[in-house]
Image (cartoon, rainbow, N blue to C red):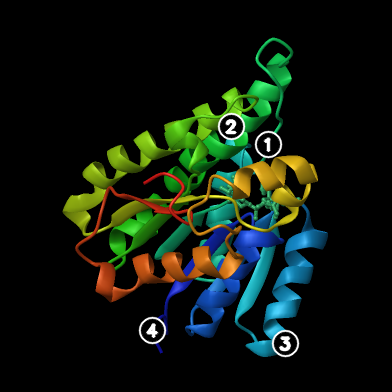
Amino acid sequence: MLFENQIAVVTGAGRGIGQEIARAFAEGGAKVVLISRSEGSCGAAAEEINKSFPDSCVSYAVDVADHEAVQALAKRIGDEVGAVNILVNNAGVTRDGLLMRMKEGDWDSVVDTNLKGAFNTVKAFMRPLMKGENSRIINIASVIGLIGNAGQANYSASKAGLIGFTKAVARELAGRAVTCNAIAPGFITTDMTDELPENVKEAVIGKIPLASFGKTEDIAKTVTFLASPAARYITGQVIAVDGGMTM
Ligand SMILES: NC(=O)c1ccc[n+]([C@@H]2O[C@H](COP(=O)([O-])OP(=O)(O)OC[C@H]3O[C@@H](n4cnc5c(N)ncnc54)[C@H](OP(=O)(O)O)[C@@H]3O)[C@@H](O)[C@H]2O)c1
């Protein structure tokens, strides 16, 4: 199997895109570490995947924005699971609002989770990633980090920052054969997009050449491709999976 004897960490894996990514790695034979904010969420997701792929998943709750807690968790994962060689930074939040009304807390929580969270995990898992053979870092950004969006200054900045971070990490770790790439999903059906009012959803679909929202599987399949040996020569890239929205 493609990911046999590999250990993949997926943040934000309690539901949505992250849970689908975790499932795809489990299907490929990896040991998968699911991380989310609450144990209830990642624990239930791991249990669900283990029904199809027994003993493939374990779960840990942490706030990825908490630097110290993430460092401590990485050590625990190293001791309890083993050396991680695939890291997927998928945890993300939105706190939308026009800049005029956006509070400092709305900015901080989004940037701290979406951008600093990736800094925290890459720092925490850097040693095993560098020691492993053909390790991978995959960051889940967003088309909003490429084109911006009114009402999402915090989210756009965090995802654009994540893309810059991806390229810098790709350059720093290339010498150790660690690749680092970003995926920029368009609108994908999850809890995050379910929150959008129907008229907004219709307006968005009108701007997507393939005329529908994407599925979580569309992102998971791109992640497993980037993590596979077939993608060994791809690094520092941003792959938009967006139905043609940003072409
Ligand atoms: N859905 C889309 O259309 C879309 C488009 C572009 C990009 N994205 C990006 O794709 C990623 C996943 O999106 P989604 O739609 O699947 O989101 P979602 O359904 O809202 O799930 C988000 C996951 O992230 C976890 N999380 C949030 N804050 C966290 C924190 N501080 N520490 C640890 N875990 C945290 C949540 O944990 P709990 O389960 O414990 O709450 C949850 O498991 C995000 O980065 C998002 O920005 C999504």
Foreground disc of the pair 2, 3: 2
Label 3 and label 4: CA atoms lie apart by: 20 Å
Element type at mark 1:
loop
Mark nearer the N terminus (2 vs 3): 3
The residue identified by callout 4 is: 2
Secondary structure category for the residue under label 4: loop
Look at mark 2 in the image and give the residue it sits on: 155
Marks 2,4: beta carbons within 8 A:
no
Residue 113 spot, x, y in % from top left: 61, 37
Q: Position of residue 106 (x, y in %)?
A: 71, 23
- Ligand 1 has an atom within 8 Å of the beta carbon of the residue at disc 1: yes
Disc on the earlier residue, 3 or 4: 4
Q: Does the CB distance between marks 3 and 4 fall below 8 Å? A: no
> In the shown orientation, is residue 243 left or right of residue 154?
left
Q: Earlier in the sequence, mark 3 or mark 1?
A: 3
What's the residue type where badge 1 is placed? Thr
Q: Which mark is residue 51?
A: 3
